Amino acid sequence: MDYSKPAFILHEALTRAAGDADLLKEAIGILLEDAPLQLRTLRDAYGAHDLQTVQRLAHGLQGAVANLGASSMAAGLRDLSHAARDKREDAIDPLLDRAHRDWTALERELRTWVASP
């Protein structure tokens, strides 16, 4: 991820929320609550060699962040989902690391936006 670029594109997220900032803030709140648990569960599933769960969770989280215009994180999660589907276990650990780094950047930006007036 290029950390000089925004982790999410506000106008894309607002467009997907039909221009409703309150709806977007609600969706972001849900993601801020759920994503850390999903990322931990992804790591646990990988540790248990449960690639089906890795694929399912990565795909679901990909959709959630894509709806916020977080294209870089969504792309990494897509790659993670595909690696799990294709049973390329050697690719999964670095992609999980990327997902955690991407989430750290995205979470910071989302919290800043939600807290803004």
Image (cartoon, helix red, strand yellow):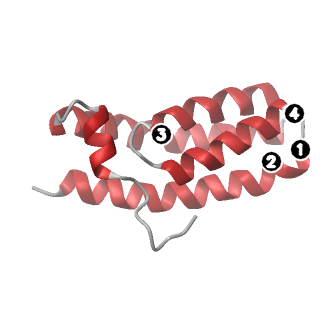
Q: Image point 64% across, 43% down: which residue?
A: 77
Q: Mark 2 or mark 3: which is in front?
A: 3
Residue 92's disc is 2
Q: Quadrant of the N terminus?
A: bottom right
When the figure is inspected, residue 23 is found, relative to residue 44, above or below; the finding is above
Note whether 95 is above or below 54 in the view shown: below
Q: Which mark is residue 66?
A: 3
Distance of label 1 from label 4 (alpha carbons): 9 Å
Front residue of 36/52: it is: 52
Q: Under tag 4, what secondary structure?
A: loop
User: Amino acid under label 3?
Assistant: Ala
Q: Which residue is mark 1?
A: 89
Where is residue 44, by image quadrant? top right
**Residue for badge 4:** 86
Pick whichever of labels 2 and 3 is earlier in the sequence: 3
Q: Mark 3 vs mark 4: which is more N-terminal?
A: 3
**Quadrant in which the C terminus appears:** bottom left
The residue drawn where x is 50% and y is 70% is 3
Q: Is residue 62 left or right of residue 42?
A: left
In contact (CB < 8 Å): disc 1 and disc 4 = no
- From the viewer's perspective, is the residue at label 2 or at label 4 nearer? 4
Where is residue 28, by image quadrant? top left
Q: Amino acid at mark 1?
A: Glu
How far apart, in angstroms, are the residues tagged by discs 1 and 3? 24 Å
Do the CB atoms of the residues marked 2 and 1 lie less than 8 Å apart?
Answer: yes
Residue 24 at what x, y percent from top left? 25, 37
Q: Nearer the viewer, mark 1 or mark 3?
A: 3
